[in-house]
Image (cartoon, helix red, strand yellow):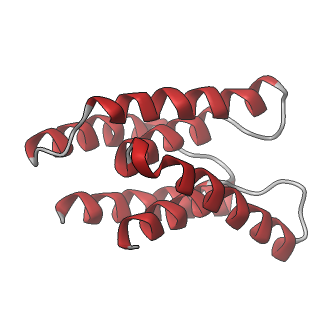
């Protein structure tokens, strides 16, 4: 349960920053990635497949970065954090739902660019509680 609370706290902070400033600070994400690995290790839920999920997310998220599509390194790091949280088994759900939520938020805000962290946060938490 502490893992969920940790993700919610980090997700709320990062989503706020991304919503307001369209930036995800490294001083939050780098320690958060380290701590989520430690927390999962301590509660016995860390699996090798979690690191495969990270590799998949890195591959998927590098494409828009390489194509210069308003996607940055902060989104990449928060994606890694989220992949560690949801794991490989639920990664497909996370990617699809976060993409759909992001499209909805873009439509509501009527913008071409909008922070991706809020959509990833909701998708990861939604996956956890389903």
Quadrant in which the C terminus is drawn: bottom left
Q: Is residue 102 above or below residue 78?
A: below
Specify whether 114 is left or right of 76.
right
Residue 4 pos. (x, y %): 28, 63
Compare residues 129 and 71 and report the one nearer the observer. 129
Q: Is residue 81 above or below residue 48?
A: below
Dividing the picture into quadrants, the one containing residue 17 is: bottom right
Residue 9 pos. (x, y %): 35, 63
Quadrant in which the N terminus is drawn: bottom left
Residue 30 pos. (x, y %): 39, 34
Residue furthest toward the top? 66
Specify whether 22 is left or right of 67.
left
Count of marks overlaid on the render: 0
Q: What's the residue at 46%, 60% (across, down)?
A: 124
Q: What's the residue at 49%, 47% (across, down)?
A: 91
Compare residues 83 and 5 and report the one nearer the observer. 83
Residue 74 pos. (x, y %): 58, 39
């Amino acid at each position: 349960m502490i893992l969920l609370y940790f993700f919610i706290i980090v997700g709320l902070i990062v989503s706020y920053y991304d919503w307001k400033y369209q930036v995800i600070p490294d001083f939050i994400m780098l320690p958060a990635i380290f701590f989520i690995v430690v927390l999962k290790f301590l509660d016995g839920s860390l699996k090798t497949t979690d690191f495969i999920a990270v590799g998949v997310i890195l591959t998927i998220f590098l494409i828009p970065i390489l194509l210069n599509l308003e996607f940055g390194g902060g989104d990449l790091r928060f994606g890694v954090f989220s992949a560690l949280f949801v794991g490989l088994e639920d990664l497909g759900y996370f990617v699809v739902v976060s993409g759909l939520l992001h499209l909805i938020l873009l439509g509501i805000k009527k913008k071409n660019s909008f922070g991706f962290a809020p959509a990833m946060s909701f998708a990861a938490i939604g996956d956890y509680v389903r």
